[in-house]
Amino acid sequence: MVMDGQGGGIGGTIIKGLRESVGNDLVIVALGTNSIATSRMMKSGANKGGTGENAIVQTSHNVDVIVGPLAILMANSMMGEVTPAMASAVSSSEATKVLIPLTQEKVRLVGVSGEPLPHLVSQVVDIIKEMNEDV
């Protein structure tokens, strides 16, 4: 599951990177906090897509991995698009979370490099590839 909000740019970049590296064997579910984000992720190669609180709450408990920006764990982040129910569902899901340390919120992460998005997406792709090989 790849989750993103606002314009879906981070999620779309992640999905493109996964498709280029892992191919079509991986089922990718795109979940957007809004329809624009979902649409952009679908155009990037996701197999399925859903939009909004209920889709995210219901799906997050039925996936193996959740990928997205760090803000998906924070209630009211992404200019209020991540509702408390969404953040709770994602954080309490038993899925492995692979999070990109990008956030517009007033959060500072210690010990995290300030690498550009393409480098971070490469790291996400490597982690997902490793997890996929272990299965």
Image: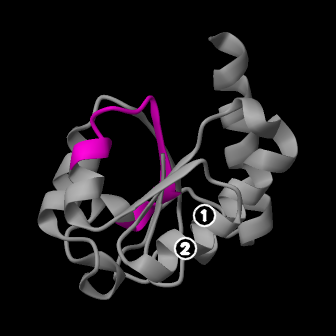
Please state which of residues 3 and 35 is positioned toward the viewer in this rendering. 35
Looking at the image, residue 63 lies above or below residue 1: above
Query: Relative to 41, is 43 on the left or the right?
Result: right
For the residues labelled 2 and 1, the Cα–Cα distance comes to 5 Å
Tag 2–tag 1 contact (CB < 8 Å): yes
Q: Which residue is mark 2?
A: 39
Bin the neighbour count of mark 1 within 10 Å (Cα to Cα): few under 14, some 14-19, many 20 and up.
Answer: many
Query: Relative to 132, is 76 on the left or the right?
Result: left
Inspect this view and state whether residue 122 appears: no
Image point 17% across, 52% down: which residue? Answer: 88
Percent of width and height locating residue 84: 13, 65
Image point 66% across, 62% down: which residue? Answer: 113
Q: Is residue 17 magenta?
A: no
Please state which of residues 93 and 52 is positioned toward the viewer in this rendering. 52
Instruction: Please give the range of residues in magenta.
Output: 58-71
Image point 62% across, 53% down: which residue? Answer: 46
Percent of width and height locating residue 123: 73, 47
Q: Which residue is mark 1?
A: 42
Looking at the image, residue 3 lies above or below residue 105: above
Q: Is residue 65 magenta?
A: yes
Image point 38% across, 31% down: which residue? Answer: 95
The C terminus - image quarter: top right
